Image (cartoon, helix red, strand yellow):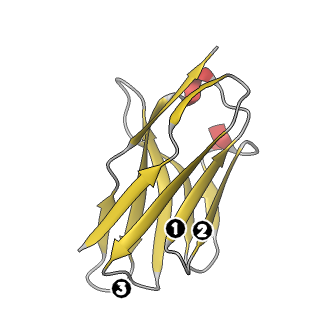
Amino acid sequence: QVQLVESGGGSVQAGGSLRLSCVVSGRISSINTMGWYRQAPGKQRELVAGSTSGGITNYADSVKGRFAISRDNAKNTVYLQMNSLKPEDTAVYYCNYRRMTPPVTTYWGQGTQVTVSS
């Protein structure tokens, strides 16, 4: 099994910054993707940023230039640095880990609330 533990959410005013962290433990594959999704009330969960173990990253258009995903493979940790936060970034943010070796399996963290006030 794999466990994901997130931290770093909170409340901030528009224009502020937050950094989310997610530690992955358990049966981990060196070939994987790690990323962050978010879900606002009444909306579907959406990809915010993703990172492959090969070093490829991708971002939602709405966060490009403001958010940065990084990972420390030695610590099995993925980070999301969020700058210039906007009220529309308010959501529950979920860490995601996908093992890309068979069996390909996806795991989710418990979610951390990010609230941005105007």
* CA distance for labels 2 and 1: 6 Å
Residue annotated with mark 1:
77
What SS does tag 2 mark? strand
Query: In the image, 73: left or right of 96?
Result: right
Which class describes the residues within 10 Å of circle 2: few (<14), some (14-19), or many (20+)?
Answer: many
- Is label 2 in contact with label 1 (beta carbons under 8 Å)? yes
Q: Quadrant of the N terminus?
A: bottom left
Residue annotated with mark 2:
71
Percent from the top left, x then y, of residue 67? Answer: 68, 46
- Which numbered disc flags the more N-terminal residue, 3 or 2? 2
The correct choice, above or below, for 95 with respect to 16 in the image is below
Which residue appears at 36% of the width and 73% of the height?
25
Residue annotated with mark 3:
101
The amino acid at mark 1 is Thr
* CA distance for labels 1 and 3: 19 Å
Q: Using the image as rendered, state which of residue 98 and residue 111 is in the foreground.
A: 111
* CA distance for labels 3 and 2: 19 Å
Query: In the image, 68: left or right of 74?
Result: right
Please state which of the two labelled residues, at mark 1 or mark 3, is closer to the viewer. Answer: 1
